[in-house]
Amino acid sequence: MINFELYKIFKIVADEENLTKASEILHISQPAVTKHIKNLEKELNVQLFKRSKYGMILNENGKKLYSQIKEPVNAILKSEDIFNVHKTINLGIHVNMPSKIYDGAILKYYDNNKNNIIDIHKLTAKNIFLRLKTQEIDLAFSKKYSDEIYDSKEIKFIKIGELHDVFIVNCNSKYLNKKFSKDDLKNTTIYTLKKFSSAYQNLIKVLEYNSNDVININNISYTAMIELLKSRDVITVITKEYIEEKIANNELSILDVGFLLPNAEFGVYYNVNNNKELKELIEILKNNCKV
């Protein structure tokens, strides 16, 4: 199947003879433009450009291809201009983020922008940052993570609110009536999310681990924690808002350990190189998300 997007990008780079100018026209990053050109060259098994300090100049293969696709691509782009009256924003949302937090904001955006589309992508944290970098998504709605998993010079975070990490057990747990000190918890295996998560980092901070301590924390996925709570009597740390329905249905219980974990920030991430107009959606998310 022919990938029209690759040929459109090829034509625009050929017209501009410059990756930066092409990226501005296409509203994608320069590395993304380069990647698409390489994908087309790989697909056709030929090189298409002479790359030099003066720009991107078509070689003989490129000139032949350009002469063949110029008019068809122009015709398709003209058709898009006639019929495509909406703007699409690709919004990445962390897979565990409850829709009730952001649903009202999405509806508000549609009230104000009846012809636009928000295409929602449910993603894990690492996929969120990978797709922000390549601009496959325009914004990401998620908890705040340690910047060790992304380039904080390229990807920025805007805080919207706070979520609540809590100790969770099953409703029949032997731990429910036990009083805990922080030392007791340090000597008990606790399950929580990956090391770059707020749940893990807050737990390390509150239990006051030092460099000589053995850290008795197992890092597993959210899904694995939920399954583990069904079959074993374990202590976990999970964001309360992710499991409120299970708490209400008496499937899980919050364990009172005598202190609170710090709140976890949530908000939107964006790539500073993205040229799309995103300010309105960001403002609507800031003002209409409900925890």
Image: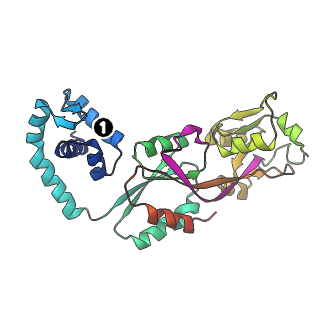
Which quadrant: the N terminus? Answer: top left
Is 122 magenta? The answer is no
Residue, disc 1: 34
The local crowd at label 1, few if under 14, some if 14 to 19, many if 20 or more residues have their Cα within 10 Å, is some
In the foreground, 51 or 222: 51
Q: In which quarter of the image is residue 276?
A: bottom left
Q: Count every numbered label the image shows and give the total.
A: 1
Q: Which residue lies furthest to the front in this view?
A: 53
Q: Is residue 39 above or below residue 19?
A: above
Q: What stretch is highlighted in magenta?
A: 145-170
Q: In this view, does 191 lie above or below 71?
A: above
In the foreground, 51 or 38: 51
Q: Which amino acid does label 1 sit on?
A: Thr
Residue 143: percent from the left, percent from the top?
60, 51
Residue 95: percent from the left, percent from the top?
54, 48
Residue 158: percent from the left, percent from the top?
56, 56
Q: In which quarter of the image is residue 90?
A: bottom left
Residue 170: percent from the left, percent from the top?
76, 46
Q: In this view, does 41 lie above or below 116?
A: above
In the foreground, 197 or 37: 37
